[in-house]
Amino acid sequence: TGHTGLDYGFVNTASTKSAITFIDGDKGILRYRGYPIEQIANSCSYLEVAWLLIYGELPTPAELAEFDEKIRRHTLLHEDLKHFFQALPDNAHPMAVLSSAVAALSTYYENESDPHNPEHVELNTIRMLAKLPVIAAYAHKKSIGQAFLYPDNSLSFVDNFLKLNFGVHSEPYEINPVMSKALELLLILHEDHEQNASTSTVRLVGSTGANQFASISAGIQALSGPLHGGANEAVLTMLAQIRDSGQSMQRFVERVKNKEDGVKLMGFGHRVYKNYDPRAKLVKAAADQVLAELGVTDPLLDLAKELEEIALADEYFQERRLYPNVDFYTGVIYKAMGFPTRMFTVLFAIGRLPGWLAQWRELNLDPQTKIGRPQQLYTGSQERDFRRS
Ligand code: CMC
């Protein structure tokens, strides 16, 4: 008390204790509830990891089956909520649609959203997991002017989502196991990442006693910025600009180093990882494999690799310990699957949802939780007398 430390961007200040995710940025380690990401990534399903993050242990087969079943039962949106999408412009950014629709969703469950009622919390955890992918797919369908499909609850979480996005009304939809596997992996890699900006937002909003819908809607907005989740979209835009500009890669890197027009190498650098981002390693390996399996060749993947190679060999990036982060290669994979660039950050949001839910729950169960309320160092005028000039 009596002393206020100033820490722009919370570089040195912990805001909470947490038992969910461990990161060692110098060693490039990421663990969910103690399990190394490398072991989890290729052996689990999205929902299995969601359970692990939310409840703290891996589910038994029976627990997982029940969880999956419950989520399938909650995928439908209220029919009225569909009109909500029609009120927005066709070119609305899907992240804005996603966040607004989650806020709107809360209006249907006002009497079942008490943060201190464990049954409500449980129910809304299931609702959010079931409905966010449907909302996301509708945001996509709206942006391309296609009819919304009803969820197909005979399908797994990931396949249902793919069908909602790429299925066409009254035509059979064929599941592509390569896409399903790739999307499952990418979603898992995004599931939690301790106190990043969007998770901290979810916690800050949650600390006021706001419900899960309100907290997660705010988290989605925080994720949308290009320095955070919006980076995956920005990487693809950057690569396309490099390709179309006719400029050499060296020249682009020079512009970044000279900080010309504030241009940054999107998908590079991280607040915590100063050696490498273990998720980026897994994504890079997946990119080659998935594109080959889908029979897609994309010159942007070659551009990304060339850019990475040049940057890693450059003193500017070495001195600042800037490496590719999770967002550097994901866009190339999403694009190969057929998602438009503007949907990329929405996919990140679906990935991150279990983490947000787990962190919100941890916050609410922690008896030491207080309303989040940072201090400031006042730099304005001294007291002065009011006089109109
Ligand atoms: N390109 C060029 N220079 C960079 C970059 C970059 N991507 N990232 C950091 N730097 C420079 C920065 O200008 C600063 O240089 P100097 O010391 O000369 O002023 C130095 O490196 C330290 O950077 P910082 O901005 O103090 O680092 P930070 O921890 O505050 O920011 C970051 C972390 C991720 C916001 C930043 O690296 C960045 O803007 N990267 C590009 C956007 C991006 O890819 N974001 C996704 C992050 S990972 C997943 C996610 O959260 O969504």
Image (cartoon, rainbow, N blue to C red):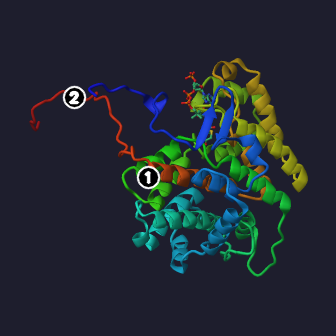
Give me the residue at 13% from left, 30% from top.
384
Disc 1 marks which residue?
364
Nearer to us of marks 2 and 1 is 1
From this view, report whether residue 111 is shown above or below residue 277. below
* Quadrant into which the C terminus falls: top left
Position of 213 with respect to 68 (left or right) is: left
x, y (%) of residue 294? 87, 55
Give the number of the disc on residue 381: 2
* Quadrant into which the N terminus falls: top left
Tell me the element at label 1: helix
x, y (%) of residue 305? 80, 35
Distance (Cα) linking label 2 and label 1: 39 Å
The kind of residue tagged 2 is Ser
Give me the residue at 36% from left, 37% from top.
374
x, y (%) of residue 372? 37, 43
Badge 1: residue crowd in 10 Å (few <14, some 14–19, many ≥20): some
Tell me the element at label 2: loop
From this view, report whether residue 32 is shown above or below residue 179. above
Sequence-wise first label, 2 or 1 = 1
Position of 366 with respect to 46 (left or right) is: left
Q: Nearer the viewer, residue 162 or 171?
A: 162
Which of the four quarters of the rendered structure image does ligand 1 lie in? Answer: top right
- Is residue 347 visible from the viewing direction of this image? no
x, y (%) of residue 153? 70, 75
Q: Is mark 2 within 8 Å of ligand 1?
A: no
The kind of residue tagged 1 is Asn
**Residues at circles 2 and 1 in contact by the CB criterion of under 8 Å:** no
Position of 251 with respect to 271 (left or right) is: right
Give the number of the disc on residue 86: none
